[in-house]
Image (cartoon, rainbow, N blue to C red):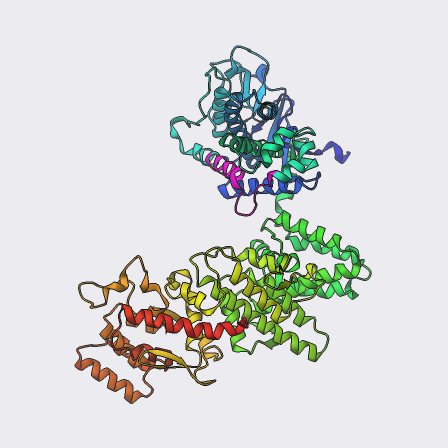
């Protein structure tokens, strides 16, 4: 027997798969109901948008969505109920792929409906050539879309509800027939398509917007209803502004793209259409024209450039053998797993184990092979590749598996020599080592430089801890470069210099992050500025700035020296925000002192407090800088590993009937309660024990925590009793077991805690924090 007689596989576009004349898809009774989650449908649309982006520059761009396994039921042995003379010309029994086929059919009806609504607008404007051209595009596209959700049985011509069949139905619930008494469509997909076809061919003029009405509001129709709402929302959002991962291609790019013109618009976009697309100040009608243009572009891509492999199998036995094989051979391979064979091919199998690339791959796999679950390995791969692309060129890489695969393969193949290819893999291995040692998965795991070398510089550790705990992963792209520079050092002296540069670069990046985030309520585009550092650097002749990019492939593999990096970060602080420009200490103080820093970021709040406490002493609750090593809060490992939490001195939610606080603190317009001056640091147990008490109560508690001897502690507890402040036994035990907490002493010295004291304290803390952090940026 020839294997070709068992099955045939055809790669097809949606237009060819669903648009085959007279073909219908039949879902057997044993198949589960349509149940694709919204996230998968949203991902499908995002993948299509990514494919459209690639089509602008690459005529071969497609979005592949897998395969479907069907049996062509020529004998109609599986169809029930059945009117044999009324069946479509070709019936395909769906063995696998029902979920994606249903989703695509639903998407096609949504595009068709939105285009039909757009048609009404363009009809009124068709006396204008550009509008008439776009109307023609809609009519052509909608004619093609019709074939994806209906089967034209040609007659009865006067009964559209009987002439046009739903493209997909389910066994036992639906019945294709030209007779009114026999035809019925009760499944979610069958009923929806039947209703939509009826609406489309109704004689109402103008037609109202289509709204699906499930029969009796049955729960089984809810998935279809929810997915339709999602597709409508996503498509409208995409043609408005793109989605979270991608923007819709710019109209200027679409109008200039030969693949877009050839594949979407039959070779031509007229000049008057281009004028509307590129106009600086379009009218309301022209803005609507642009949205419709995007809709036609996106819908055409979905129809013509989504690719699916249709596997037509001889019988059900073979079909299920194939179904089982395709679905039990393992989880999807990660982007790196599909990339590794290309590296081996280039190095040749014969020379593989002795090649430089072999060792680089070993380092990468040491990271990724820790993860046994497929989803964990996929995430770890994404966590590596996204900052890696940033470190290479400053460009964005999405979490989409296909996008990551294409990036690795194309970027590797683009390298001009085997040495350049090896450097690419080596750079990826540096990123993997960084992820494995410097930025380990568990936040509790101590950072290391290499497997057997711990990071012993406490300030460096503290900076890395802040960036990790804040999930500020964008900084990894910058840090990859300095870490790779250290790992790649050729001798001890060079390695020592590279390590010092890595430490100081980490401090500079951390200081930038803290100063930027603490002075504004949002991230304010911080990620885009990191990309600029990597991709293009800064050239501003007026400001005397000429800084090359940090990206490895943008600067011949060189890293910026510390002064260049510091200048780049200071330049961003000074110029790259419309409302907040930080050139000097006064600029930062103006924005940070009154900021609700606690709500902006708890981690940054802690870091600013530690920076202010560092080598400081206090008098009457006010800090002043002391001698070196007086109180090394940024260099003492005890404060890196202690479970420090933020304590609101004046409670966030005091009892207004019992406590005697200065109620001006709680003016919502100012948000003083969340400012620097109302915060201190406490270990978790001490923070829980202090509670939301009065200032008098809290003052004794702070005094107890900052007492230097057991005798002093007992005197404070006794004094508190005389003042009718009684600590519960559990609190007394915490006070007795607590470590000496010197940073609390400045709070304990305050006699009256009020709005004035908070503002004074905010100014004091911000001043000292700036004095410390600004040195990391060389102000």
Q: Hey, which residue is sitting farthest front in the picture?
A: 542
Between 65 and 439, the one nearer to me in the picture: 439
| Vertical placement of residue 632 versus 544, above or below | below
In the rendered image, residue 249, in percent from the top left (x then y), is placed at 60, 41
Q: Is residue 469 visible?
A: no
Against 395, residue 255 (above or below) is above
Q: Along the horizontal axis of the image, is 497 left or right of 237?
A: right
Residue 249 part of the magenta segment: yes
Q: Residue at x 72, y 66 (%)?
A: 359
Specify whether 206 is left or right of 295: left
Q: Position of residue 475 (x, y in %)?
A: 56, 62
Q: Is residue 232 magenta?
A: yes
Q: Nearer the viewer, residue 728 or 145?
A: 145
Q: Give the residues drawn in magenta, as a range.
A: 229-251
Which one is nearer the viewer's eye here, 374 or 328? Answer: 374
Quadrant occupied by the N terminus: top right
Residue at horizontal 27%, vertical 61%?
666
Report the predominant secondary structure element of the magenta stretch: helix
The quarter holding residue 767 reads bottom left
* Residue 29 place in picture, x, y as percent: 52, 30
Toward which corner of the image does residue 506 lie, by quadrant? bottom right
Residue at the limit of the structure toward the right, as seen here: 350
Res. 670 in view: yes
Q: Compared to 258, does 501 lie above or below?
A: below
Q: Position of residue 655 (x, y in %)?
A: 22, 63
Count of number-bearing discs: 0
Q: Is residue 693 above or below residue 111?
A: below
């Amino acid at each position: 027997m020839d294997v070709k007689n068992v099955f045939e596989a055809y790669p097809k576009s949606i237009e060819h798969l669903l648009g085959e004349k007279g073909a219908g898809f039949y879902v057997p009774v044993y198949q589960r109901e349509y149940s694709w989650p919204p996230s998968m449908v949203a991902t499908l649309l995002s993948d299509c948008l990514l494919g459209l982006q690639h089509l602008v520059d690459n005529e071969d761009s497609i979005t592949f969505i897998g395969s479907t396994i069907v049996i062509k039921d020529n004998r109609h042995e599986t169809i029930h109920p059945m009117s044999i003379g009324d069946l479509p010309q070709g019936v395909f029994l769906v063995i696998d792929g029902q979920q994606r086929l249903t989703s695509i059919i639903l998407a096609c009806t949504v595009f068709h409906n939105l285009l039909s609504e757009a048609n009404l607008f363009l009809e009124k404007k068709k006396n204008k050539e550009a509008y008439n051209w776009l109307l023609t595009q809609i009519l052509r596209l909608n004619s093609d879309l019709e074939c994806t959700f209906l089967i034209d049985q040609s007659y009865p011509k006067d009964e559209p509800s009987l002439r046009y069949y739903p493209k997909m139905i389910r066994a036992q619930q639906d019945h294709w027939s030209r007779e009114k008494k026999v035809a019925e469509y009760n499944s979610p997909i069958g009923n929806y398509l039947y209703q939509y076809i009826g609406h489309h061919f109704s004689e109402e003029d103008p037609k109202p917007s289509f709204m699906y009405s499930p029969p009796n509001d049955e729960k089984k129709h809810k998935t279809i209803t929810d997915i339709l709402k999602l597709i409508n929302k996503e498509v409208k959002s995409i043609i408005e502004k793109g989605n979270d991962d991608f923007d819709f291609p710019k109209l200027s790019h679409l109008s200039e793209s030969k693949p877009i013109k050839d594949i979407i618009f039959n070779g031509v976009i007229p000049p008057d259409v281009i004028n509307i697309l590129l106009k600086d100040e379009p009218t309301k009608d022209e803005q609507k024209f642009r949205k419709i243009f995007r809709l036609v572009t996106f819908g055409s891509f979905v129809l013509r450039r989504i690719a699916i492999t249709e596997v037509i199998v001889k019988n059900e036995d073979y079909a299920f053998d194939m179904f089982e094989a395709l679905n039990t051979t393992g989880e999807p391979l990660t982007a790196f797993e599909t990339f590794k064979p290309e590296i081996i091919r280039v190095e040749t199998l014969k020379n593989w184990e002795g090649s430089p690339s072999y060792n680089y791959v070993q380092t990468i796999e040491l990271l990724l092979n820790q993860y046994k679950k497929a989803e964990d390995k996929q995430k770890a791969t994404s966590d590596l590749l996204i900052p890696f692309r940033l470190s290479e060129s400053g460009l964005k890489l999405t979490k989409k598996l296909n996008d990551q695969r294409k990036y690795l393969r194309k970027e590797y193949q683009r390298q001009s020599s085997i040495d350049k290819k090896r450097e690419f893999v080596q750079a990826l291995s540096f990123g993997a080592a960084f992820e494995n040692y410097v930025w380990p998965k568990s936040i509790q795991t101590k950072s290391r430089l290499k497997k057997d070398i711990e990071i012993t510089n406490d300030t460096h550790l503290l900076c890395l801890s802040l960036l990790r705990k804040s999930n500020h992963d964008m900084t990894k792209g910058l840090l990859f470069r300095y870490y790779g520079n250290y790992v790649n050092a050729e001798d001890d002296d060079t390695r020592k210099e590279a390590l010092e540069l890595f430490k100081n670069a980490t401090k500079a990046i951390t200081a930038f992050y803290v100063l930027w985030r603490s002075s504004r309520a949002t991230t304010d585009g911080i990620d885009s500025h990191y990309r600029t550092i990597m991709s293009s650097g800064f050239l501003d002749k007026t400001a005397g700035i000429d800084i090359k990019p940090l990206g490895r492939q943008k600067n011949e593999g060189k890293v910026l020296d510390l002064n260049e990096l510091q200048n780049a970060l200071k330049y961003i602080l000074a110029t790259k925000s419309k409302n907040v420009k930080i050139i000097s200490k006064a600029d930062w103080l103006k924005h940070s002192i009154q900021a609700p820093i606690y709500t902006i970021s708890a981690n940054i709040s802690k870091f600013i407090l530690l920076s202010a406490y560092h080598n400081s002493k206090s008098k009457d609750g006010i800090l002043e800088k002391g001698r070196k090593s007086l109180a090394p809060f940024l260099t003492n490992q005890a404060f890196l590993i202690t479970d420090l939490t933020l304590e609101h001195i004046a409670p966030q939610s005091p009892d207004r009937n019992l406590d005697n606080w200065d109620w001006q603190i709680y003016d919502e317009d100012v948000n003083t309660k969340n400012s620097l001056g109302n915060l201190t640091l406490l270990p978790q147990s001490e923070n829980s024990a202090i509670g939301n008490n009065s200032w008098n109560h809290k003052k004794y508690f702070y005094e107890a925590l900052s007492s230097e001897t057991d005798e002093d502690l007992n005197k404070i507890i006794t004094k508190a009793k005389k003042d009718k402040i009684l600590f519960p036994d559990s609190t007394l035990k915490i006070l007795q077991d607590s470590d000496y907490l010197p940073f609390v002493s400045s709070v304990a010295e305050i006699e009256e805690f009020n709005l004035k004291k908070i503002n004074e304290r905010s100014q004091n803390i911000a001043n000292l924090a700036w004095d410390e952090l600004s040195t990391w940026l060389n102000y």
